[in-house]
């Protein structure tokens, strides 16, 4: 059996919720105790607010699929993200959400996986160039320690910027954006805890707004250029000029501009476009970067997993064409790479908790859940439930592989694996994220030997997404492509 990979062990149960809130200021995981990983439901009352943690799969299905309208996104979701993403799809409810989802689904037709592969491949090539340069600068034959978390953040942001705006994201521009978002992440986690302590909502939001400005300003500028550019074309109501000579790029931004709601005939306004693009930029890279940072870390720690992954890629490419780029069809034939990614998402779900608000009095598992309760569903807790998952903290991609998965594994994958959420609010970017992850992992293992780095392991913290406070390092040694 493989040794367990790292994770922040939950503290022994403490009755006083204030003590847990205090720990939660640093990381959302501080709110949890060891008991939470063994029970179907937990609840606490604090300052007049009823808080629930729901782990039982049947109850989770009720909340997220069957009775989704009775458990919409909690107002805290909007409040914590509004300075950054305004009223974008992720945090709104009801008809406002339904209209946005119709428009977004239409726009996503453009970002079909086959069509976005060249953008993904361009960004991954740029990543390989950067890694190669880092290796060449040091000793080309010796393993070189790289900050793989940073590399994954840059490549995934580059992928999504190329997909949305048809241009790369590089250098100082990227560094400024990441720094602003890292600051927002830190403050947002703290703001949520301080909000539970009843600190002024408006003042906390204004504090967050300062950090969001850099990102919104950068995205607004890109949208203004498109809307006022000579090729703004017949982009709906945004520009009354006649169509220019050149046609606009067929990217996700253009698809969002042109999307028209079949029910109301409306399109996204300019302000709504800024909100949606801000959200898609964040959703499209922050989550994938978190998952890929941990996936590469795991691959560096488990040599037999890495060998199997490399063998899968090499077998697919064959020895004669071992340096050819991976095609769309190739990426559909990497089941082990998909299993590694899925198991990483089980152990380290980038969105570690979802919060909902009950709209009426109801029963949850064995307790009364009053109207306006804050109901938490945590993939982090559910995907590590003891007594449900065999070796809940172990790294076993085989659970997600058709040839080795047991009937119990299959059932758990259906009912207790929810890194992309469930039901109508489920992530529409899941297939995009999988294709990107398979491409990145395949390109890494075919070119480099990934070795564990010396020094401290990742210090995982739960904020808006799951990230490591001290970065993630691996050592890379270049391989010959024809071996
Ligand atoms: C590993 C990568 C990703 C993970 C783990 C992830 C996870 C999630 C989760 C958990 C939700 C729903 C949360 C809830 O129910 O409260 C969500 C929503 C969403 N995600 Fe992702 N996501 C990923 C990548 C992406 C990508 C690449 C895109 C777009 C290109 C994207 C676009 C969205 C959108 C638009 C929503 C809102 C859906 C709605 O509210 O109707 N995500 N994501």
Image (cartoon, rainbow, N blue to C red):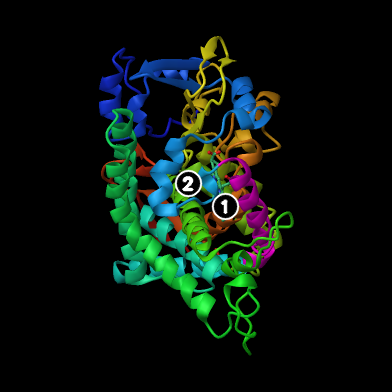
Please name the residue shown 63% across and 90% down the image.
Answer: 245
Number of residue marks: 2
Please name the residue shown 60% across and 21% down the image.
Answer: 59
- Residue 118, given in percent of the width and then of the height, sits at 60, 70
Q: Quadrant of residue 50?
A: top left
Question: Does the magenta portion include 108?
Answer: yes
Question: Does the magenta portion include 462?
Answer: no
Task: Mark 1 and ligand 1: say if the CB distance to the nearest ligand atom is below 8 Å.
Answer: yes
The answer, for residue 336, to whether it is visible in the render is: no
Determine contact: label 2, label 1, CB under 8 Å: yes
Q: Quadrant of residue 269?
A: bottom right
For the residues labelled 2 and 1, the Cα–Cα distance comes to 10 Å
Picture quarter with the C terminus: bottom right
394 or 45, which lies in front? 45
- Residue 86, given in percent of the width and then of the height, sits at 45, 52
Please name the residue shown 49% across and 38% down the image.
Answer: 349
Q: Which residues are magenta?
A: 93-116
292 or 288, which lies in front? 288
- Residue 413, given in percent of the width and then of the height, sits at 63, 32
Residue projecting furthest to the right: 262
Task: Tell me the SS state at disc 2.
Answer: helix
Residue that label 2 marks: 291
Q: Is residue 258 left or right of residue 186?
A: right
Relative to residue 123, is residue 296 depicted above or below? Answer: above
- Residue 202, given in percent of the width and then of the height, sits at 31, 43
The mark found on residue 158 in the picture is none
Residue that label 1 marks: 433
Residue neighbourhood size for the residue with mark 1, other residues' Cα within 10 Å, grouped as few (<14), some (14–19), many (≥20): many
Looking at the image, is mark 2 or mark 1 earlier in the sequence?
2
Please name the residue shown 42% across and 46% down the image.
Answer: 81
Task: Mark 2 and ligand 1: say if the CB distance to the nearest ligand atom is below 8 Å.
Answer: yes
């Amino acid at each position: 059996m493989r040794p367990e990979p790292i994770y922040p062990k939950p503290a022994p149960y403490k009755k006083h919720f204030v003590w847990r809130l205090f720990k939660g200021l640093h990381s959302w995981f501080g709110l949890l105790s060891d008991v939470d990983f063994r029970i179907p439901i937990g609840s606490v009352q604090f300052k007049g607010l009823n808080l629930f943690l729901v782990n039982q799969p049947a109850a989770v299905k009720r909340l997220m699929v069957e009775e989704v309208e009775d458990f919409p996104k909690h107002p805290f979701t909007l409040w914590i993200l509004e300075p950054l993403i305004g009223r974008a799809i992720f945090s709104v409810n009801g008809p406002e959400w339904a209209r946005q989802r119709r428009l977004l689904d239409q726009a996503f037709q453009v970002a079909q996986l086959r069509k976005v592969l060249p953008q993904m491949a361009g960004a991954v090539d740029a990543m390989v160039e950067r890694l190669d340069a880092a290796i060449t600068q040091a000793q080309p034959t010796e393993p070189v320690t790289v900050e793989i978390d940073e590399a994954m953040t840059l490549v995934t942001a580059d992928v999504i910027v190329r997909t949305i705006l048809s241009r790369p994201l590089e250098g100082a521009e990227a560094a400024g954006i990441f720094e602003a978002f890292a600051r927002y992440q830190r403050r947002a986690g703290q703001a949520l805890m301080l909000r539970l302590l009843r600190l002024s909502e408006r003042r906390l939001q204004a504090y967050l707004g300062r950090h969001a400005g850099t990102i919104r300003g950068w995205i607004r500028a890109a949208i203004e250029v498109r809307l006022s550019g000579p090729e703004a074309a017949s982009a709906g109501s945004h520009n009354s000029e006649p169509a220019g000579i050149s046609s606009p790029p067929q990217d996700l931004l253009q698809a969002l501009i042109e999307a028209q709601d079949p029910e109301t005939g409306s399109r996204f306004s300019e302000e709504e476009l800024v909100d949606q693009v801000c959200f898609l930029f964040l959703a499209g890279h922050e989550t994938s970067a978190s998952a890929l940072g941990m996936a590469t870390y795991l691959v560096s720690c488990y040599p037999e997993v890495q060998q199997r992954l490399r063998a899968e890629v090499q077998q697919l490419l064959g020895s004669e064409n071992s340096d050819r780029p991976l095609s769309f069809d190739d990426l559909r034939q990497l089941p082990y790479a998909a299993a590694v990614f899925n198991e990483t998402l089980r152990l380290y779900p980038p969105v570690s908790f979802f919060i909902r608000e009950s709209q009426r009095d109801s029963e949850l598992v064995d307790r009364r859940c009053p109207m306006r309760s804050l109901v938490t569903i945590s993939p982090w807790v559910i995907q590590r439930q003891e007594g449900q998952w065999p070796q809940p903290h172990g790294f076993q991609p085989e659970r997600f592989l058709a040839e080795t998965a047991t009937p119990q594994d299959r059932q758990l994958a259906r009912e207790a694996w929810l890194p992309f959420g469930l039901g109508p609010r489920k992530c529409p970017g899941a297939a995009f994220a999988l294709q990107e992850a398979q491409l990145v992992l395949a390109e890494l293992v075919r070119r480099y030997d990934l070795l564990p780095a010396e020094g401290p392991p990742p210090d995982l913290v739960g904020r808006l997404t799951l990230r490591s406070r001290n970065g993630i390092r691996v050592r890379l040694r270049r391989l010959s492509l024809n071996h």
